[in-house]
Image (cartoon, rainbow, N blue to C red):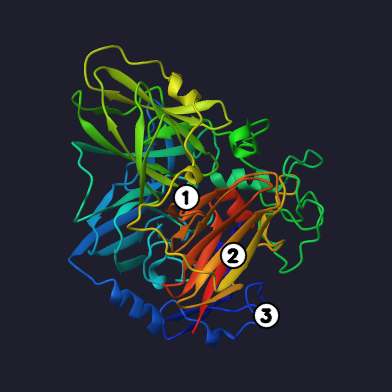
Amino acid sequence: MRIPTRRAVLGAGIAAAGGSLLAACSKGSDSGPSAAPAPTDLVSPDGKEVAAAEGKRGGGPVRKVALTATPTRLDLGGRTVTTWAYGDRLPGKEIRVTAGDTLAVTLANHLPEPTSLHWHGLALRNDMDGVPGITQRPVKAGASFDYRFAVAHPGTYWFHPHSGTQQDRGLYAPLIVEDPKEPLAYDKEWVVVLDDWVDGVDGSTPDAVLAELSRGMGGMDHGGGTGGMDHGGHDMSHMSMTSRTSRTPASAGPSPTGPSRMMMGATSPLLGGDAGDVAYPHYLVNGRTPEDPETFTAKPGDRVRIRFVNAGGDTAFRVALGGHRMTVTHTDGFPVEHTQTDALLLGMGERYDVLVEVKDGVFPLTALAEGKKRSALALLRTGGGAAPDADVRPRELAAAPLTADRLRADRSVALGERRPDRTITLRLTGSMAKYDWAINGRKYTPEPRHLVGAGERVRLVFVNDTEMWHPMHLHGHTFALPGRGPRKDTAIVLPGRRLAVDFDADNPGLWMIHCHNVYHAESGMMTVLGYRK
């Protein structure tokens, strides 16, 4: 028996007419009047407004890619697992295009269940965003789907399913959009994808992990916050999540397979206390364990651009290159004022680009699973010498890692000063005890709840009422952190804290806002933003 996730309920939110997709609208929204417009008053994912916005992005040379999602066996470096991936490699094969190109990807689904492709961080046409039940129908097992869209902005991006817990298998890959007017000078470029891995290890699967977490922790509440509140709204008790009134869901799905993966005692002051929910058996750099790491080679003195992507499901990574300082040049695809640091912190879904002038020798590139006391590893080799041990901890990891709030946007991409036309407050609610993660106390349903108008400056106010951190991700747009902070699409919101970010409503359609912890999102910490016509 497979655990039902949001795939099982999203279809109820779709109204199809001649291939047109439109999610039904709720009767209330804290971002608009007490009675929200009928669905016909919202821009549909394939509406003329979406087509007009796409036309402004241009559409240069077409880059065609064939992608197959399939069950496979992968060697993680001395450990072979059965999983799902794009082809037979982890991460999936990188897609590289130039800003201004048109990307045409045919996804063939050879999996035993429906899937999708979300292009994380891209401002693209809404009907290509890859969210079943919102922007497209699921790609059924044995079927295929053609994604085609203009790629406007250079930067470091990635893609993954937006279907249940599939992203926490091997279904992810980097998407690099090159700048035709690249201002940086460097000799080499490396793409470094970080991941936490559980699928296929001793019988574990991400669905089984979700089933275990959904049973909650009874009286051992380290999530706190709104654990005792009455969550109104839609009844989602048929999903594999904790019910609103009981610490044990009425229908929790099958018993988890494999050993317990519930994490206890993972603490990080940097993340406000609780570091994560899942005790992963492996942490990976580019699909390799520390016992058999990938080795990058260069010559002493080379200037190297490293593009970091955190593709993890439940883990923030603290990253350092032993013996070197890094100069941060971009985050989430957008340039920042260059800032030097010994270490970086990446939440799930975040990306950072850095420049490093490499020294002579062999050096560890270590990604510490923040608060979880384990690490991933790659090596930099520019000369002779013995490789460091798998559990090496370079001294740079002890330095306070750079976080996004310490960066400022490059002036070329800084969001201009303007008072917001609309403020949307998103309270992050729930607890580990009940595993009832939600937004504004309401678990996810596919109706647009937060309405905006084209051309508005919108302020999103994330208020974290929980005792866990949440990396919050907005689809189809980038927002600016306060004080001319960096342009980002994913930002960490610490427990008990408030984060206000601004964006311009310049990409019409229906767009997800959600926590990029896979398990928090799947248990309900997601919502939908919709454009009025």
Residue 525 visible to an observer of this rendering: no
Q: Residues within 10 Å of mark 3 (few under 14, many from 20)?
A: some
Q: Are marks 1 and 3 in contact (CB under 8 Å)?
A: no
- Pinpoint residue 504: horizontal percent, then vertical percent: 45, 69
Q: Residue at x 52, y 64 (%)?
A: 512
Residue 129 visible to an observer of this rendering: yes
Residue in the foreground of this view, choosing between 436 and 153: 153
Farthest front residue in view: 417
- The residue identified by callout 2 is 527
- Pinpoint residue 514: horizontal percent, then vertical percent: 56, 58
Q: CA distance from mark 1 to mark 3?
A: 32 Å
Q: Residue at x 38, y 51 (%)?
A: 70
- Pinpoint residue 412: horizontal percent, then vertical percent: 32, 57
- Going by the numbered disc 2, the residue's amino acid type is Thr
Residue in the foreground of this view, choosing between 502 and 289: 502
- The residue identified by callout 1 is 167
Q: CA distance from mark 2 to mark 3?
A: 14 Å
Residue in the foreground of this view, choosing between 339 and 278: 339
- Pinpoint residue 505: horizontal percent, then vertical percent: 46, 72
| Mark sitting on residue 27 | 3
Q: CA distance from mark 2 to mark 1?
A: 19 Å
Mark 1 residue element:
helix
| Mark sitting on residue 72 | none
Q: Are marks 2 and 1 in contact (CB under 8 Å)?
A: no
Q: Residues within 10 Å of mark 1 (few under 14, many from 20)?
A: many
Q: Earlier in the sequence, mark 2 or mark 1?
A: 1
Q: Residues within 10 Å of mark 2 (few under 14, many from 20)?
A: many
Q: Is residue 380 above or below residue 483?
A: above
Determine the image quadrant of residue 277.
top right
